[in-house]
Structures are given as structure tokens and as C-alpha cells.
Amino acid sequence: METIKKVADSITEQTFALMPKNLNGQHRLFGGQLMSWIDSLAGIVAKRHAQRTVVTAAVDNLKFKEGAREGDLLVLIGKITYVGTTSMEVRVDTYVESLDGIRRTINRAYLVLVALDENGHPAKVPRLELTTESEKAEWEGGKRRSELRRQRRIEGF
């Protein structure tokens, strides 16, 4: 019997307080630190969906919209947006949260992760049940991004 999971089954949220060790020379969030947190969160989301070990295969559309500063609270939220046979696309949104709980988006990234079996080979992942219009729209976007990634591989990118 084929396994089917919902987007909500693997949504993951993490919060970080920015400290001096997370900053660059301009006293803003170091982009490499955020990229590391995004990759780690995406791995958790994908592992929850696949219920297997996963590896990152690609990072798409990592867009820095705004900076963050020491003392800011960062909230990262990740969710599955599209699945193939052995791969999963994960969207990670990063927000700065103000003291009154208002969140503003500072980054959005899409990552592709591949599930692995016990021998390190790609393994089948559960299908994704889409329950909302938003999830269906993300799926369609994920299909387009998957095709663009496939085309870039053919062209040698």
C-alpha cells in the first residue's frame, strides 16, 4: 500500500535570537548562517515527510529581501511543497518577529532533498495529499521549478 502524507504532517518552525556570533561586519545577520539554518530546517521537514535519511540536492530561489540585526527574533517555517519519486521540494520562509508578534518576511528559499535507503541509494517518498488551494498552488509552482531544474541539468547548469 502506498503511503500518503499531508503537508501539515511535516511543517516545522524554529526560532532563533540573533547574537553577535550570527552577524557579519555590518552588524547584520550573516547570510551564510541563515543559509545553514535554512538547510537544517529543510532537512528536518524532508526527514519527517520521508521518514528516512535525506540529503540536500539543490537550493533554489534563496532571496534575501531584508536584513536582520542583533537581538532580532528570527522565525523559520518549512513545509513540503512538491514531491517526486525520491525527491521533495521544501519551502522555507524566514521572518523577523517584533515584540508584538508581528512577522515580516526577510527570506524565502526552495530546497530539493532526496530520501536515501540504508545503502545510501535514493528511496521512494510518500505521496503528498493536497488539502488547500494554497497547497495546490504551491504544488503547481513546484512542478514548474522541477521542470526548470531538469532543463538546467540538461543544459549543464
Image (cartoon, rainbow, N blue to C red):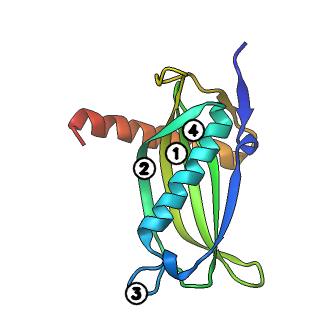
Question: Do tag 4 and tag 2 residues touch (Cβ < 8 Å)?
Answer: no
The residue at the point 52 percent across, 67 percent down is 107
Chain-order first, disc 2 or disc 1: 2
Element marked by disc 3:
loop
Mark 1 element type: helix
Q: Amino acid at mark 4?
A: Tyr
Q: Amino acid at mark 2?
A: Val
Q: CA distance from mark 2 to mark 1?
A: 15 Å
Horizontal placement of 78 versus 68: left or right? right
Q: Is residue 137 visible?
A: no
Q: Position of residue 85 (x, y in %)?
A: 53, 24
Judging depth in this view, the residue of 91 and 141 nearest the camera is 91
| Residue bearing mark 1 | 141
Q: Quadrant of the N terminus?
A: top right
Kindly identify the residue that appears in the image at 62 percent across and 71 percent down: 95
Please say if 124 is above or below 87: above
Determine the CA span between mark 1 and mark 3: 35 Å
Q: Are marks 4 and 1 in contact (CB under 8 Å)?
A: yes
The number of numbered badges drawn on the structure is: 4
Q: Which mark is residue 82?
A: 4
Q: Nearer the viewer, mark 3 or mark 4?
A: 3
- Look at mark 2 in the image and give the residue it sits on: 59
The answer to whether the residue labelled 2 contacts the one labelled 1, judged by CB atoms less than 8 Å apart, is: no
